[in-house]
Each structure stands twice: as structure tokens, then as C-alpha cells.
Amino acid sequence: MDDDLVGAQSGTGRRGTLLITLAPGFPAAEVALVEAVIRERGGQVTRHGRTPAHDDALYPAGSDDLLRAAVAYLAHEIDPAGGLTRALYPWDAGTFRPGQGSRNFEKGLALGLAAMGQRARRRDA
């Protein structure tokens, strides 16, 4: 297999093995980035208690707080002074903790996964 392409990737964590089949041509270097987002979401759940049930109870139908928080972390990358971030971030400003390097992407995309999951649960309910 070409070093720049990955056909499948698996990882083993505390809860078992995850097997993801990637499309032909998926860049191998981006697999680690996807894993970082999954690890961040896992930390949100295990370290901070932000389980799907927690999110659903705290943010009722019609709330876009998870999505707004996700976009705020991503927006911080283009607006580090924070005007856009402050306008988007739905919670107390003291809870916004931007990171260095790729951490804002990891946090934002992990919050985006949480928001997607919440929408899917509501749609299927």
C-alpha cells in the first residue's frame, strides 16, 4: 500500500477496538488527526462527564450551544483576539480555554461530533 494512502486503520483503547474503513486515497497523515479528535471527544466524556445523556439533559431541543461552542474554538484560529469567539461562545467566558497548535481544532471538532450526535439522537427520537 502507498505510504500516502490508508485503506483501513484500527486503534485499541480502554473500551475496545475501533475499526474504520477509509476511502481509497485518504491521506495516511490525516489518520492521526482524526484519532486526536476522537481522543478529545473521549476526554470530554470520561474526564469531564460530558456524556450524550448529560448533553441532552443540559441542552434541550432547539439549543445550539454545542454547535456554537464548536464553531467558537474553530473561529479562534482566525480571530485570536477573540471578538468572534466571544460572540459565538455560549457559556461563561472563563470556561473558554483555547489551546496551542492543533488543540483548538481538536476541541472544536470534538464538540462538533457531540453536536452531530445530539442532532441524530433528536432526529431518531
Image (cartoon, rainbow, N blue to C red):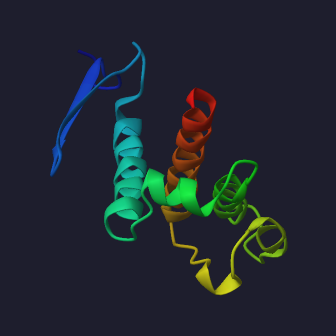
Furthest residue to the front?
125
The image shows residue 82 at horizontal and vertical percentages of: 77, 75
The image shows residue 57 at horizontal and vertical percentages of: 56, 59
Q: Is residue 29 above or below residue 83?
A: above
Q: Residue at x 39, y 12 (%)?
A: 24
Q: Residue at x 46, y 51 (%)?
A: 52
Q: Quadrant of the C terminus?
A: top right
Side of 50 where 55 appears, left or right: right
Side of 53 where 88 appears, left or right: right
Q: Is residue 123 above or below residue 40?
A: above
Which is nearer the eye, 67 or 125?
A: 125
Q: Residue at x 41, y 42 (%)?
A: 34
Which is nearer the eye, 19 or 8?
A: 19
Q: Quadrant of the N terminus?
A: top left
The image shows residue 41 at horizontal and vertical percentages of: 42, 54
The image shows residue 87 at horizontal and vertical percentages of: 84, 69
Q: Is residue 61 above or below residue 82?
A: above
Residue 33 figure quarter: top left
